[in-house]
Amino acid sequence: MDLTEIQALQQSLLEQKGLILNKSHEFRLEQADRSSYGDEAEVASGNVAEDLSLHLHEKDRRTLYQIERALAKISSGTYGQCESCGAEIGDRRLAVRPFSTLCVSCMEEQETIPRQ
Ligand SMILES: [Zn+2]
């Protein structure tokens, strides 16, 4: 990846970060709005939607974490390096998965280890 590509990536990560932060702000406003209805039946029927919102929120938080990590790597100049062996992850892999932290062989190695 050359400098221009890195800068473009950094820009797009910052934009994604902004979108998520906006969304979580809206989410909080929505929650505050909902809590103003005191009816218990309303609360019960609202559970499914609420779980979904929480789930989305959790997913956003994870994405945000990945974005922050990628941004930190970009600024320290280690973006695109495998965290395990230090090899280049490769542009093609990064194009598909910009948050990859392992090269293909390290990832495969990790996947063969059974989860505990
Ligand atoms: Zn590796």
Image: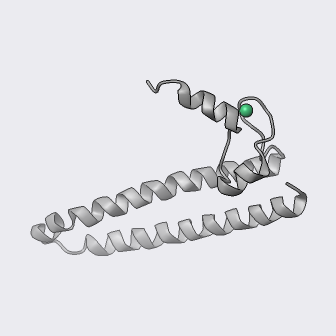
Q: Looking at the image, which is closer to me, 102 or 10?
A: 102
Camera-side residue of 79 and 22: 79
* Foreground residue among 98 and 24: 98
- Ligand 1's image quarter is top right
Residue at (64%, 55%) from the top-left corner? 67
Image point (45%, 73%), residue name: 26
> In this rendering, would 58 be left or right of 102?
left
Residue drawn at point x = 68 percent, y = 41 percent = 101
Q: In the visual, does 21 lie left or right of 76?
A: left
- Vertical relation: 107 (above or below) 45: above
Q: Which corner quadrant holds the N terminus? A: bottom right
Residue 76, percent from left and from top? 82, 46
Colour treatment of the image: one colour
Q: Residue furthest right?
A: 3
| Figure check: 89 above or below 108 | below
x then y, percent, for residue 71: 72, 53
Q: Return the x and y of residue 18 as percentages of the image width and height.
A: 61, 69
- Residue furthest toward the left? 41
Number of numbered discs on residues: 0
Quadrant housing residue 105: top right
Say which quarter of the image contains residue 106.
Answer: top right
Classify residue 86 as left or right of residue 20.
Answer: right
Q: Residue at x 66, y 46 (%)?
A: 100
Left or right: where 24 falls relative to 110? left
In the picture, which quadrant includes the C terminus? top left
Residue 66, image x and y in percent?
61, 50
